[in-house]
Amino acid sequence: MTSTTPSAAPGVSLEVRGLHKSYGGRPAVDDLSFVCAPGTVTGFLGPNGAGKSTTLRILTGLARADEGEALVGGEAFRSLSQPARTIGVMLDARALHNGRTGLETLRLTARTVGMPAARADEVLAMVGLEDAGGKRVGGYSYGMRQRLGIGVALIGDPSVLVLDEPANGLDPEGIRWMRRLLRSFADAGGTVLLSSHQLREVEATVDRLVVISQGRLVREGTLEELTAGAGTRVTALDPAALRTALDRHGIAYEHRAGAELEVSLAPEDVGRLALREQLVLTSLGATAGGGLEDAFFTLTGQGEPAAQAPVGPAGATPPVGPVGPAGAQPPAGSAETQPPAAAPSAAPLN
Ligand code: ADP
């Protein structure tokens, strides 16, 4: 019987240093820095359009940074001698070839990256698709495609996994499965970076979070550190001007009694924003820490569906300038095209 748990070779970190990338003069990633250490599962969180995929594409050699560095074990992806043996990548499971079976997909990937065919059977079991290995991918559910995409990433027995929205389309059992898989990968010394626009999808899976909005780092730390913080209750002499300023910076808030707002920023950041916007504040105070739900609202501006008027992405450091279009897709024919889903990491496009 083959192994059904991933066996990361330990000790390869991921590092992003002062990364910048613009499309058409508009920053998609703006002076971003963070590190993911071996043995950890890092959630890369931010609303749609925040710059997560762009960062992951730069890290995996599919796009070039305008400035800064993205390093895998201290080296740029393009300098790695055996990329697929070092870093497994899943960027878009939707683009897997529909006409191939799951097993054929894995065997082809194994051959491409120089692994024995038996590795495909091993990985098929790891991702829980033994019974669907002979079925065409076109007949797979979205969750099964996600599993297969993760399988493609695991084929080279890498030390690092980079997964773009892996929890998308997974049911609760699928999310539990992913948590176990990634946990055992990290416990074996592997490094995992996975993106999500939903804290709730990944909160049980990750140890640390790197939160971005509009291409910039908002917060970074362990789940505990990030969920300990809370928001701010604030009133202004001109409440409409305060709301307008918050809207303009894409900062989430909820209405409270009177003209009071609960804002998804620390009090000092609300104070800074008021200074910059020349607003007179009439009250300002931290709200009590409220656990994950509040942190979710605070970090991404995406509260409970019932929450009142949550708007836009939020950040501890309010970005200056217009808010980008959430979820905007790159224009067709742009210089750098989207990668094929779950492409073997050995085959960067540009
Ligand atoms: P996320 O993954 O967080 O949803 P993206 O990295 O996909 O965010 O996008 C960040 C910003 O960069 C968005 O405004 C998006 O429209 C833009 N963008 C991403 N890729 C391209 C591209 N190839 N061409 C032009 N604009 C792009």
Image (cartoon, rainbow, N blue to C red):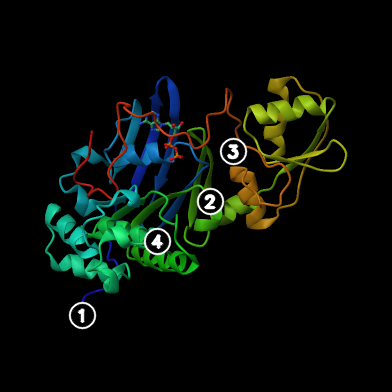
Q: Residue 313's mark?
A: 3
Query: 178 or 225: which is nearer to us?
Result: 178
User: Which residue type carries mark 3?
Assistant: Pro
**How many other residues sit within 10 Å of disc 4, few (<14), some (14-19) or many (≥20)?**
some
Q: Residue 284: x and y, percent?
A: 80, 36
| SS label for mark 2 | loop
Q: Which residue type carries mark 2?
A: Gln
| Residue 47 % position (x, y) | 53, 41
Crowding around mark 2 (Cα neighbors within 10 Å: few <14, some 14 to 19, many 20+) is: many
Residue drawn at (74%, 19%) of the image: 278
The quarter in which the N terminus is drawn is: bottom left
Q: Which residue is mark 4?
A: 143
Q: Nearer the viewer, residue 231 or 302?
A: 302
Q: Kindly report the distance in space between the C-alpha atoms of the residues bearing marks 3 and 2.
A: 12 Å
For label 1, the residue is: 1
Mark closest to the chain's N terminus, 1 or 2: 1
